[in-house]
Amino acid sequence: MNITLNGKIVFLDKKMMVDELLEVTKAQTPEYITVQINNEFIDKADFGITPINEGDTVEYLYFMGGGQ
């Protein structure tokens, strides 16, 4: 199945949940990632029960700190 992940087309060989996708894609610091699927934010508590579907657009969002 094909999805768009952070603007790039990615092929997944099976259906998976958000937490599995983070693992398979080797997301850096997954504990700090906010995930958006089709412009909808997914609650961290739901990562294990939210499926990734064919054609979904998934964005990994990272909080950036800094400034004065």
Image (cartoon, helix red, strand yellow):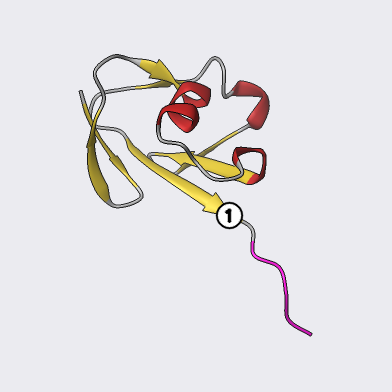
Q: Which residues are magenta?
A: 64-68
Left or right relative to 47: residue 25? left
Disc 1 crowd rating (10 Å Cα; few below 14, some 14-19, many 20+) is some
Residue at the image position 57 percent from the left and 24 percent from the top: 47
**Extreme residue toward the right, this view:** 68
**In magenta stretch: residue 39:** no
Q: Quadrant of the N terminus?
A: top left
Residue 52, horizontal then vertical, whole percent: 37, 24
The residue at 71%/68% (across/down) is 65
**Residue type of the residue flagged with mark 1:** Tyr
Residue that lies at the very extreme toward the bottom in this rendered image: 68
Report whether 11 appears left or right of 41. left
For residue 27, above or below residue 63: above
Q: Quadrant of residue 67?
A: bottom right
Side (left or right) of 44 relative to 1: right
Q: Main secondary structure of the magenta part?
A: loop
Residue 6 placement (x, y as % from top left): 36, 50
State which quadrant residue 63 falls in: bottom right
Q: Residue at x 31, y 22 (%)?
A: 53
Q: Position of residue 11 (x, y in %)?
A: 21, 30
Residue indicated by mark 1:
62
Dot 1 lies on which element? strand
Position of residue 28 relative to residue 63, above or below, is above
Q: Quadrant of the C terminus?
A: bottom right
Instruction: Examine the image and state in which quarter residue 28 appears.
Output: top right
Viewer-closest of 7 and 31: 31
Residue closer to the observer: 27 or 40: 27
Number of marks:
1
Q: Is residue 42 toward the left or the right of residue 11 in the image?
A: right
